[in-house]
Amino acid sequence: MRKFLAMLLGLAGLFGMIATATAEGSHTPDQAKALVQRAAEYLKREGKDKALAAFNDPKGEFVDGDLYLVVLDAVDGKLTMLAHGANKALIGKPQIDVKDANGKAFNQETMTALSTADDYWVTYAWPNPTTKKIAQKKSFFAKVGDVFIGAGVYN
């Protein structure tokens, strides 16, 4: 009987770990795009100051675990970080020369693409704030006035 109970407890623990791992990476590209579109509408409706405060709130409506917003100032070509739902230390810092874990200049790629398009998908290797590991991330960016709003999902 003890062996049977130990086996059941072991299986319950295994299923719990699987559920946690699945929940951490459970967001879809469609959810990332929908978050960006909702944020764009919020920015247009509420104005830049109120929107940036909401986007920067790690416990607010625009952050869901590893799904969060980034907002970049696109005016000066430096791509300065205005909002980041997972890392406030990046706010105010230029992002144009940032490269991913493989050396890809994904911000430059995004800025170039958004110079002629209203939105863009980009893929790059980035630290997942939930797992603390480098993972492939696919992000959707939309140009809204003088800013780029983005959100992405980890594979």
Image: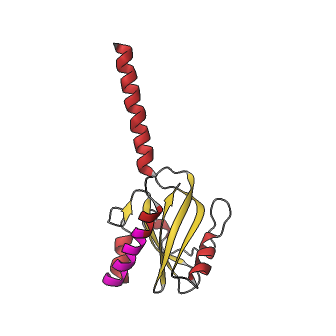
Question: Residue placed farthest to the top in the image?
Answer: 1
Residue placed most toward the observer, 81 or 152: 152
| Left or right relative to 24: residue 75 | right
| Residue 139 position in % (x across, y down) | 52, 66
Queried whether the magenta region covers residue 108, the answer comes back as no
| Residue 81 position in % (x across, y down) | 50, 74
Is 48 located above or below residue 99 in the figure? Answer: below
Quadrant, the N terminus:
top left
Residue that appears at 39% across and 37% down? 16
Q: How is the image coloured?
A: secondary structure
Residue placed most toward the observer, 6 or 127: 6
Is 132 located above or below residue 124 in the figure? Answer: above
| Residue 14 position in % (x across, y down) | 43, 33
Magenta stretch: dominant secondary structure: helix
Question: Residue placed farthest to the right in the image?
Answer: 103
Residue 43: quarter of image: bottom left
| Left or right relative to 72: residue 31 | left
Residue that appears at 32% across and 65% down? 60
The tally of labels here is: 0
Residue placed most toward the observer, 141 or 77: 141
The part of the chain drawn in magenta is 34-46
Residue that appears at 43% across and 50% down? 24
| Residue 38 position in % (x across, y down) | 36, 73
Question: Residue placed farthest to the front in the image?
Answer: 30
